Every structure is written in C-alpha cells, then in structure tokens.
Amino acid sequence: MQHYIETEGDTVEEAIEHALNELEATREQVTIDIISEPTKGILNFGAKPAKIRATLKQDVSTAPETILKEILNRMQIDAEVESEFVDGSTHLNIATDSPALLIGKHGQTLDAIERLLNCIINKASLVKKRVFVDTEGYRGRREDRLIEMARQVAEKVRYTDREVVLAPMSARDRRVIHVALKEDDVVSTYSQGEGEMRRVVVTTQQPYNPN
C-alpha cells in the first residue's frame, strides 16, 4: 500500500511544499498529482486553493508492511498487515487469528516487534521515520485500562495522602499514566528505577524526577 496525502495551497507549488514538509520527503521521493488548480473567483469571492495528492515512491521490498510481514512469517504467524499514514507516521495493524501470541505479557512481544521494525527501517535511512504497530485494537484497550487504573490510584493517594509505587512498565505505558494525571490538582507523578524496573510513582508531593 502506498502512502499519500492531499494538501492545499494558494498555488500548486505551495501545496506541493506543504506535502513535502508533512511527508518529510524531497521532490524526487514523491509522485505529484494535481487534483485542482487554484481559482480566483469573482472579486475575491468563491476563490478556491490548489489541491494536490503527493504519493511516496517506495521500494516494495523495503516498505514497512512488507518488512513486518517477513518478521511475522519468520515467527510462523499467519496474518495480514493493514497500513495507514497518520500525522507523518506509519501505523500498521496486524489482523490475525493469534493476537495473544503477538501481544505477549502487557504488550511486551508487540513492543519488541515494533522496536525491531523501526530499527530495520531506519538503519540506512537518512530521514528517520516512526512506525507504530498494533493488533486487533490492543493499544487502545491497553491505554483505556491504564487510564482507569491511574484514576483509581490517584483517588487512593488523595484519600490516604500516601504515595503509591506502580509495578514496572514500559516507557509507552508510563507515559500514559503521566499524561492521564498531568492535570490533576492534587497528585503528581514521576518515574524511578532503571531499565526494565523503571516504574511510576503517584504522590501528593512535587515530583523530583519527572519523565
């Protein structure tokens, strides 16, 4: 699946420039299709901007979805990969009958696949790209559970005025907790520990090591 975006501008060149900036690509790396030329309208009323579609030229063998499929094949997992380009990043969804095998404990296997994929894609790339990997909506469900847990813990901390140290979790999960409680007027959060043992602390005190 090719990645493309549609952009507008006062001129065709301006619309192209917007597309190149959003895709973080050069003119040689994209194919440009002019959807509509700009029109001035009558007495500046009814004017319409130029609109173009910019499609990334991509070697099929190095496309993120192709590399992910190869990783899954080596894991002997039968799956289909769906690709979507959102806000400058590639989002890949794995459709499979074995999502639990891909997810692993607290998403650790899925996180490992995502890290490996990003390393492969960016190894020889001058422009670093971020690729996100999900399966069967797991990321969204995990985030919802973490947010609910964060709110429950925050309520406990407010009631007891005693800090709570959560179990070790990934950087992605820690960030969800921090963001969920960022606007809380009473509790605050910070991370402590190193590596796989890094965890979030929810407290009524001011954080001394925010993450």
Image (cartoon, grey):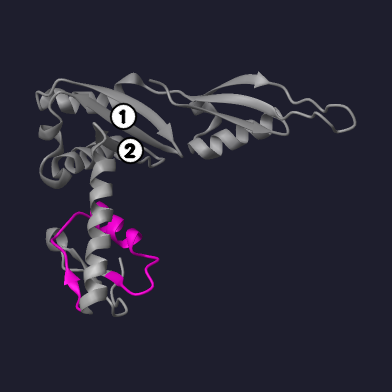
Where is residue 2 drawn, in percent x and y? 42, 22
Q: Is residue 171 visible?
A: no
Horizontal arrangement in the rendering, residue 210 relative to residue 70 (left or right) = right
- Amino acid type, mark 2: Val
- Vertical placement of residue 35 versus 88, above or below: above
Q: Is residue 172 visible?
A: yes
Viewer-nearest residue: 168 or 193: 168
- Label 2: state its secondary structure: strand
Horizontal arrangement in the rendering, residue 16 relative to residue 178 (left or right) = right
Where is residue 184 drawn, in percent x and y? 37, 68
Reply yes or no: does residue 180 show up in magenta. Answer: yes
* Image quarter in which the C terminus is found: bottom left
Q: Which mark is residue 173?
A: none
**Mark-to-mark CA distance, 2 and 1:** 8 Å
Horizontal arrangement in the rendering, residue 106 relative to residue 95 (left or right) = left
- Amino acid type, mark 1: Pro
Where is residue 159 drawn, in percent x and y? 24, 75
- Label 1: state its secondary structure: helix
Viewer-nearest residue: 86 or 67: 86
Which image quarter: residue 110?
Answer: top left
- Vertical placement of residue 114 versus 4, above or below: below
Q: Which residue is mark 2?
A: 131
Contact? badges 2 and 1 (CB < 8 Å): yes
Q: In the rendered structure, which segment of residues is drawn in magenta? A: 162-189
Q: Which residue is mark 1?
A: 64
- Residues packed near mark 2 inside 10 Å, few (<14), some (14 to 19) or many (20 plus): many
- Vertical placement of residue 186 versus 18, above or below: below
